[in-house]
Image: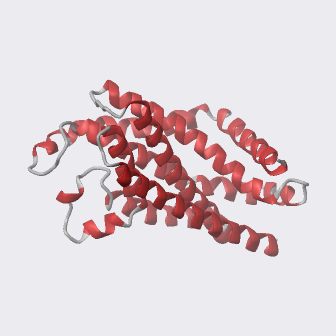
């Protein structure tokens, strides 16, 4: 219970920090909204390609933009860890009675809350732009679960990188190097059977693609449940591995502090 309570307190601390930066919240929301609006209009005729398999590009794109915005929101949370390190906040936490895992869990809980709110806003915008789904509330729930299961491990890895590299410039370079290839080797923008031959096997092992496919199948309402379960299970395994990596990185930081 102490771990849960301390994780909640850490989440509240980070949420308060975020609320003190309204412009940061606005820009965080505006960017994926621009992606959805611009990409939805720019590529809307791509559904006419033989074999694309979607009636509406905005309907195809919305789950992809949810995953993409989740990916970038999660990838950058390591910057907050660097700021805590530079300001001595992390060292003060280490000499306090707080449960050590709560330092990481609180940040991931705060991230999950942001992801859920952001995903709901993007889903609502997609519906306003013409996206129609037959999956109902269950489909939306799986969309949110798939987004959180993508964001949590990416966030954990970002925290691990911050604890190991400890330089903001290094985190920025590493995040850009990783996130863009993950985005463009997934089905965020294009149907998998129309991707280049060499890219299709890469997409099968891309966690961004697992999240997008689980969400799309669930929102369609008539998909094979096995496909959704397999994708979510793969994301869960990825989350467990990332949590272990973040734990090891935090222990290494404790020993060196």
Q: Residue 45's x, y, as percent? A: 14, 40
In this picture, is 186 found above or below 32? below
Q: Residue at x 16, y 49 (%)?
A: 52
Q: Residue 162's x, y, as percent? A: 64, 64
Q: Quadrant of residue 164?
A: bottom right
Q: Is residue 27 visible?
A: no
Q: Residue at x 32, y 38 (%)?
A: 221
Q: Residue 2's x, y, as percent? A: 85, 49
Q: Residue 68's x, y, as percent? A: 41, 49
In this picture, is 138 found above or below 169? above
Q: Is residue 216 left or right of residue 44?
A: right
In this picture, is 25 found above or below 128? below
Q: Residue at x 40, y 37 (%)?
A: 139
Q: Is residue 206 visible?
A: yes
Please state, as top left, top right, bottom left or bottom right, where the C terminus lies in the image. Answer: bottom right
Name the one closer to the observer, 166 or 250: 250
How many discs mark residues in the rendered view? Answer: 0
Which colour assignment does the render follow? secondary structure
Q: Residue at x 74, y 38 (%)?
A: 12
Name the one closer to the observer, 17 or 148: 148
């Amino acid at each position: 219970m102490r771990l849960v309570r301390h994780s909640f307190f850490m989440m509240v601390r980070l949420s308060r920090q975020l609320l003190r930066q309204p412009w940061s919240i606005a820009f965080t929301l505006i960017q994926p909204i621009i992606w959805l609006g611009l990409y939805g209009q720019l590529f809307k005729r791509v559904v006419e390609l033989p074999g694309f398999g979607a009636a509406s590009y905005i309907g195809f794109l919305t789950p992809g933009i949810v995953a993409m915005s989740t990916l970038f929101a999660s990838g950058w949370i390591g910057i907050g860890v660097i700021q805590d390190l530079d300001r001595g906040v992390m060292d003060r936490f280490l000499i306090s009675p707080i449960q050590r895992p709560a330092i990481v869990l609180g940040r991931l809980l705060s991230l999950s809350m942001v992801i859920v709110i952001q995903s709901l806003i993007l889903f609502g915008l997609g519906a306003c732009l013409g996206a129609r789904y037959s999956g109902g509330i269950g489909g939306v729930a799986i969309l949110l679960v798939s987004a959180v299961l993508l964001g949590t491990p990416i966030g954990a890895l970002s925290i691990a990188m911050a604890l190991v590299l400890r330089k903001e410039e290094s985190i920025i370079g590493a995040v850009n190097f990783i996130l863009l290839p993950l985005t463009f080797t997934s089905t965020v923008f294009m149907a998998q059977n129309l991707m280049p031959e060499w890219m299709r096997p890469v997409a099968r092992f891309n966690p961004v693609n697992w999240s997008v496919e689980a969400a799309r199948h669930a929102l369609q309402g008539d998909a094979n449940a096995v496909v959704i379960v397999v994708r979510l299970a793969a994301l869960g395994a990825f989350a467990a591995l990332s949590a272990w990596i973040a734990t090891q990185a935090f222990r290494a930081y404790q020993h060196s502090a």
